[in-house]
Image (cartoon, rainbow, N blue to C red):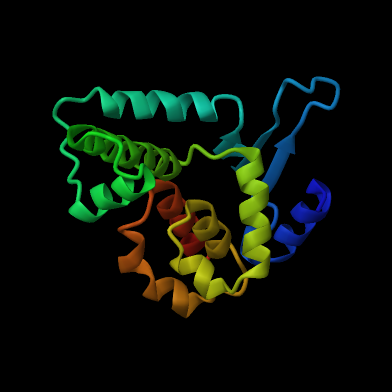
Amino acid sequence: MSWSKLKQQLESFLSPALHGRVEYRATSYRYLPGKPGICYLAVDKKNVLNMSETTGSIRWYQTEQELKNDPDLQIPISQEEIEAIRKETKGTVPEERLQVIARNRKITELAKELLTAQAALSKSNFVTTANKFLSTSIEESLESDDILLNILALMDRRVGKKRMLNMAEKMKLKHPAVQYFYELRRSTL
């Protein structure tokens, strides 16, 4: 789906109180194929949530390396995880190396989760998540662990006043960006 059509559909689901205040914006560089695009959410003409592809993989790698080199980081590894690696390698890897492999895999997963939680999203992630939002129920989007799905659902006109007020406790456990959009939407009730 083209960006303009996607933007149009997202804006059609926007709460009436947020029309004109919240905008979905994207830039891409047609004649510079090496320069990736940027996607962001703007509230009252100010960029609030940026999604850029420029440093996503670099930041993920840096985070992974920082976690691997942190001597204080304790990552529990279960016997099942070691057994799974032993089966993958067909028993040819020494026992102490199995633990290193298991630890590194967990650190890689943790680095990806950290970046997602920090809203280090890319334009392609935004487009993918927006399409997912348009095809799933509002309840699934609200309950999801995906920050962007939560934000899109909170700004949706299908989420009424009663449901918004009932979500106050759940929102305390969410990412600060989700909390920001929750408060924005609550201020319009």
Horizontal side, residue 61 vs residue 149: left or right: left
Residue that lies at the very extreme toward the bottom in this rendered image: 162
- Residue 80 lies left or right of residue 182; in this view the side is left
Q: Position of residue 4 (x, y in %)?
A: 82, 49
Can residue 45 be seen here? no
Q: Residue, x 61% and y 31% (percent of image)?
A: 53
Q: Taking 163 as reference, is 60 above or below it?
A: above
Report the residue at 51% width, 74% height from top. 139
Q: Residue at x 21, y 25 (%)?
A: 70
Does residue 61 sit above or below 124 in this rendering?
Answer: above
Query: Whole-percent x and y of residue 9?
Result: 76, 61
> Residue 150 placed where, x, y %?
50, 59
- Above or below residue 77? Residue 108 is above
Q: Position of residue 73 (x, y in %)?
A: 18, 33
**Residue 147 can be seen in this image:** yes
Residue that appears at 49% across and 54% down: 181
Residue at the right extreme of this rendering: 31
Q: Which is more toward the observer, 160 or 152?
A: 152
Observer-nearest residue: 189 or 3?
3
Judge from the rendering whether residue 119 lies leftward or rightward of residue 65; answer left or right.
right
